Every structure is written in structure tokens, then in C-alpha cells.
Image: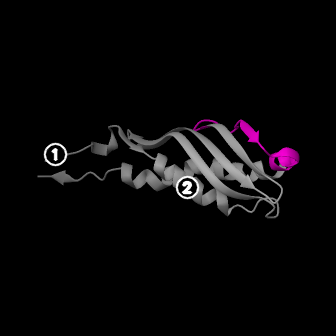
Amino acid sequence: MVVHNPNNWHWVDKNCLPWAKEYFATQLPKLELSNNQFKITNVNVTGDCDVSNRKGKVICIYDMILEITLQSEETTGTLKVKEFIHDEQEYEYEYSNFGSTKALVQSQIVPEIQKILWQFQDDLVKSQEEDLQLKNVAHE
């Protein structure tokens, strides 16, 4: 009898960047931003996003850059999360082309976007857990 990866002890890795791109492209535009004064029209995600299983534990490691395009009647600007990293909850933002609406974006829109960013890690692990934790099946 042979058991592959008994007790999920050995490393199993999965590239989850495509999942992350879909997640943010779906979740962020759903936000109601500043009484619908702004809407998210595009989300670009680059970097690395991996989920791993080691010694029976599912862990995730990611280091991504998010570029979020926000549009209002007055302007179209880009909010860039420069280092969206798995072990941080305070992010550095770069604001481009918001003009007089920058203060509004900082005070009202960024906190709403942060809620999605903070939820990402839990959602990522839950969505990938089943694929990574192998059931020990005896092969003859």
C-alpha cells in the first residue's frame, strides 16, 4: 500500500494569481463608493500569489501590486497599492489624477477598499484549501 503525501506533510504549492485577479475584478467594483459618486472601472493585479500546504497547514504568500481605476463625473484617477503583502495590513497608496477629489478618495473610498483587501487572505485560503489538502488514499 502506498500513500502519497501522508498527512499532507510535504509541500504542495499552487499559483493563485489568476484567482486573485478574478477576485479583485469581481469584489472591488461591487463597492458603493461615496454614495456612488465614484465607481471602479478597472483593476489591474500583478505580482505573486501562492497558496501552499506544509505539514497539514494551508498558508498563503503574496506580494502584489494593485492598480485600481476610479471614475467620477469630475475625474478618472488611479489608486495604486504598491505592496499588497500577506503579512501587512497597512498599505502604501499612490494617487494619480484625482485633483481636488484626492481628499475624498483618501477619507471615504480607501477605507472601503481596505475592507476587501483585509478579507482577501481568508477568502483565498478558504477557496484553495480543498485543492491542497489531499485525502490519504491507499493505492494498490
The image position of residue 67, as x and y in percent, is 64, 45
Q: Is residue 124 visible?
A: no
Where does label 1 land, which residue? 2
Q: Nearer the viewer, residue 20 or 73?
A: 73
Q: In the rendered structure, which segment of residues is drawn in magenta?
A: 84-106
The residue furthest right is: 100
Q: Residues within 10 Å of mark 2 (few under 14, many from 20)?
A: some
Q: Name the spot of residue 24 as percent of width and height, x first.
A: 59, 53
Can you name the residue that lies furthest to the left here? Answer: 140
- The residue under label 2 is which amino acid type? Tyr
Tell me residue 78's x, y (percent): 71, 46
- Vertical comparison of 119 with 95: above or below: below
**Is residue 101 inside the magenta stretch?**
yes
Residue linked to disc 2: 23
Q: Residue at x 82, y 52 (%)?
A: 108
Mark 2, secondary structure of its residue = helix
Left or right? Give the position of 80 relative to 47: right
Residue 68 x %, y %: 67, 49
Whether residue 121 appears in magenta in the rendering, the answer is no
Depth check: 49 or 137 in front? Answer: 49
CB atoms at circles 1 and 2 under 8 Å apart?
Answer: no
Residue type at the position of mark 1: Val
The residues bearing labels 1 and 2 have C-alpha atoms spaced at a distance of 37 Å
- Asked if residue 104 is positioned above or below residue 49 in the image, the reply reads below
